[in-house]
Amino acid sequence: MALGDWWRHGVIYQIYPRSFQDSNGDGIGDLPGITSRLDHLNDGTPGSLGVDAIWLSPFYPSPMADFGYDVADYCDVAPEYGTLADFDELLAQAHRRGIRVLVDFVPNHTSDRHPWFVASRSSREDPRRDWYVWRDPKPDGSPPNNWRSIFRAVGGAWTFDHPTGQYYLHSFLPQQPDLDWWNPEVRAAMHDVLRFWLDRGVDGFRIDVAHKMARDPELRDNPAELAQGDVAGIQRRDEDWPEVHVILREFRRLLDAYGDRMAVGEVGIYDPERLVRYFGEAQDELQLAFNFAFLVQPWRAGAFRESVDRYEQLLPAGAWPTYTLSNHDNPRARSRYADGDDAGAVRRARVAAMLLLTLRGTPFLYYGEEIGQADGEVPADRVVDRDGRDPERTPMQWDAGPGAGFTSGDPWLPIGSEARAVNVAAQRDDPRSMLSLYRRLTWFRRRSVALREGSYRPVGRAPGVFAYLREAGTERLLVALNFGHAPAELRGGDQGLPRSGTLEISTDPDRGAGSVPLSSLELGPDEGVVIRL
Ligand code: GLC
Ligand code: CA
C-alpha cells in the first residue's frame, strides 16, 4: 500500500448533521445545510479550514431514539435531513472541492422499527427471527446472561418481548436490537448496504462500534471481574470476539474491490494491545482504527507522551495511527481541559489543536473544535439523549445572530451560551483566533511532508513538556508543547538539537516570529510551538 493513500495524510472532519446547518428553519440541521457550508471546510484557499474529508454521522431514516444510530432504512435519507438527491448533490459539491466523504455504517444493530426487526419480532417462525439475538429466559424468568448495555441508564442488555416469550439482545437502547452476525444472511444484507453507498460514490465509512459485531456464540456470562470495566488479560464475552476479525476482513475485501475506498473503525477498546489487532495480521482489516486514549487521559505531558509512544511501539508495520480530541459521544476539548479556569482552557485547547495536527497519524476534527466551541448548557427540560451527550452536540456557532447562523427557527438543542463571542464570523478575520490557529496548522500540515508522512521521535524529558521531532528527507520539525500553567524550558543542547531553529507557529499569538535558541527553549504557560530545524 502506497504511503500516498489520501486517508493517511488528510485531515478528516466529523459533521453531526443534526447540528451543523439548518437550511429550512425547522431547527434541525440537514444535508442541504451541510452543502451550503462546504466552503468553510475547504474552498482551496488558506482562508478555509483545509480539510481533506468529512465524516457524516448517520442521516438515514430513523425514529431517532439514538439520533440516527438506530437505523430504520440503511439506504435512504431521513426526511428531516433531505433526500437521496440532496445527498448526491452534497457528494458532488464536496468532490468538486476535493473533499472526500465518509458515511457512518452502523452494522451492530438496527432500529426496532427496521422492517427486519419488525419481522423478526413477529413470530418465532419468521424467516428473519435469527437475524437478531433471541433467547429464552432462564428458568426463573431472568435474562439469559449478565451482559449490560453500554448506556448506564439502560441497565441490562436484554429486553423481554411478551408476544413471543423471549428476550432480545441490545448493546445500547432497547430500541437498538443487536443483529446476529453469525447469520450469513445478515452479512450478505449488510454487504449490500456497503455496496449501495460505494456505488453512489462515497469514499468510505466510519464503522460504528466495529468491535461489537461478534460475541460469544454461547452467550456465556461476562466474568465477574469485569463488572467495573475492562481488566487486561480477561476476555469479555459480549464484544471483541475473535470472529469480528473475519467480519472486518470481509468488509476490507469488499472495499478493496472498489479501489481507493477506506474504513475507519470506532473500536471502543482502550487497551492498545487489543486495539492494534483491528488492523489485521496482514493489514487486511481496518485501514484506520480510532485511538480514543486522548479522550480519557488527564491533561499531562507525561500521560500524552506515554500513550503516543506506547501506541507507536505497538502499531504493526504499515499500520497508521489516528487521533481525535472529541466527538459526538465525548466532552469537547475546550470543556474537558477547563479545570475551572476559562482563559487557561482556551490556551490548552490551542495546545491540543497543535498536538492533534502535528502528530504522526490522521487527525479527526469534530465540528466546532476549530472555533474552540465549548460544551453547551442543556437544562433538564431540554435533555434529549439517554446517555448525557447533548452538551457536545449543540449547534455549530456560525455567527452572533439569535440562532448562531445555524437556524432561523428554534434549534433542536439550545445554542451555546458563548455563541455571541465564539463563532466563525467573529474569528474568521482575527489572526489571534482559534480558527486562525487551526487554519494555520492545517495548511502548514498540507505543505509539510514531515508532518504528513514523516517519522516521530520524542525528545527531552523536561517536566510538563511533551516534545517530538517529525522528520522526512531534509525537512526536520520540532514540536514542543507545554502542558503546564507555568513557563517551561526545553534544553535542546542535551538532545543533540541544533543551536537554533526558526519558529513556524506558536499557539501564543503574541510570540514573535524568527529565530529561537534551542540550547534553552523557553515556552510560555500552556504554549506550544512548531520550530523548523
Ligand atoms: C457509537 C456511536 C454512538 C451510538 C452508539 C450506538 O458509539 O458513536 O453515538 O450511540 O454507537 O450506535
Ligand atoms: Ca432543517
Image (tube, rainbow, N blue to C red):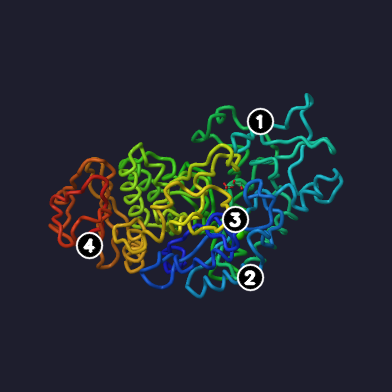
* Residue at the spot of label 2: 200
Q: Secondary structure at mark 1?
A: loop
Quadrant position of residue 156: top right
Q: Residue at x 17, y 49 (%)?
A: 522
Q: In front: mark 3 or mark 2?
A: 3
Q: Is any atom of residue 453 visible in this view?
A: no
Q: CA distance from mark 1 to mark 3?
A: 38 Å
Q: Residue at x 79, y 34 (%)?
A: 136
Classify mark 4 as within 8 Å of ligand 1 or not, answering yes or no: no
* Residue at the spot of label 4: 532
Q: CA distance from mark 1 to mark 4?
A: 55 Å
Q: Left or right: 458 with respect to 400?
A: left
Q: Residue at x 28, y 67 (%)?
A: 473
Q: CA distance from mark 2 to mark 4?
A: 43 Å
Under mark 3, the amino acid is: Ile
- Give the crowd class for mark 4: few <14, some 14-19, many >=20 residues within 10 Å: some
Residue 91 in the image: state x and y as whole percent: 57, 70
- Give the crowd class for mark 3: few <14, some 14-19, many >=20 residues within 10 Å: many
